[in-house]
Image (cartoon, rainbow, N blue to C red):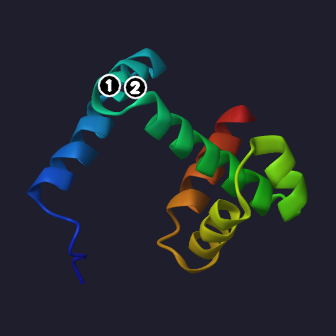
Amino acid sequence: MLEKWKDKLTDQLCQAFLSLQTPEEVYSFLEDVATIGEIRALSQRLEVSRLLSEGYTYPQIAQQTGASTATISRVKKFLEYGADGYKTVLERIKAREQ
């Protein structure tokens, strides 16, 4: 079932990310397309997902990332019941680090 937020424009955004080949290109695109606050929020959520998947507690995660318990809870919900986007990314990052 196609989600309501998925459309021609979001398809184009996904294709834009897929077209980037280096971290520098990604940085440049992110800097142009999002505010620093938005980029930091996305980065924080990814780190929260990593820490949750490694078994850290909410207080530990809040202390390490500065994320609110509401943000941690939201990320946990998506880790457990979401589309597995976090899991895919975390697995691929971990595989590259090995």
In which quadrant of the rendered image does the C terminus lie?
A: top right
Q: Which corner quadrant of the image does residue 10 belong to?
A: bottom left
Compared across the picture, whether 17 is left or right of 92 comes to left
Of helix, strand and loop, which one carries label 2? Answer: helix
Is 18 above or below relative to 21?
below
Separation (CA) of disc 1 from disc 2? 5 Å
85 left or right of 52?
left
Q: Residue at x 10, y 56 (%)?
A: 8
Name the residue at 24% across, 84% down: 1
Q: Which residue occupies 63% across, 44% down?
A: 44
Asked whether, in this view, residue 25 is left or right of residue 15, the answer is right
Assess disc 2: are there few (<14), some (14-19) or many (≥20) residues with their C-alpha within 10 Å of its C-alpha: some
**Residue topped by disc 1:** 29
Q: Position of residue 80 (x, y in %)?
A: 63, 77
Which numbered marker is on residue 71?
none
Q: Answer above or below: position of 3 versus 88.
A: below
* Towards the viewer: 98 or 90: 90
Question: Where does label 2 land, which residue?
Answer: 26
Quadrant of the rendered structure where residue 56 is? bottom right
Q: Nearer the viewer, residue 86 or 62?
A: 62
Given the image, on which type of amino acid does mark 2 rest?
A: Val
- For the residue labelled by badge 1, is the local secondary structure a helix, a strand or a loop? helix
What's the amino acid at mark 1? Phe
Q: Is residue 87 above or below residue 46?
A: below
Whether label 1 touches label 2, CB < 8 Å:
yes
Q: Taking the image as drawn, is residue 85 in sight? A: yes
Is residue 55 visible in the rendered image? The answer is no
Report x, y in % for residue 74.
60, 69
Q: Quadrant of residue 18?
A: top left
Please tell me which residue is depicted at 16% across the width and 46% down the height of the picture. 12
Question: Where is 83 relative to 14, above or below?
Answer: below
Please, which residue is most extreme toward the bottom here?
1
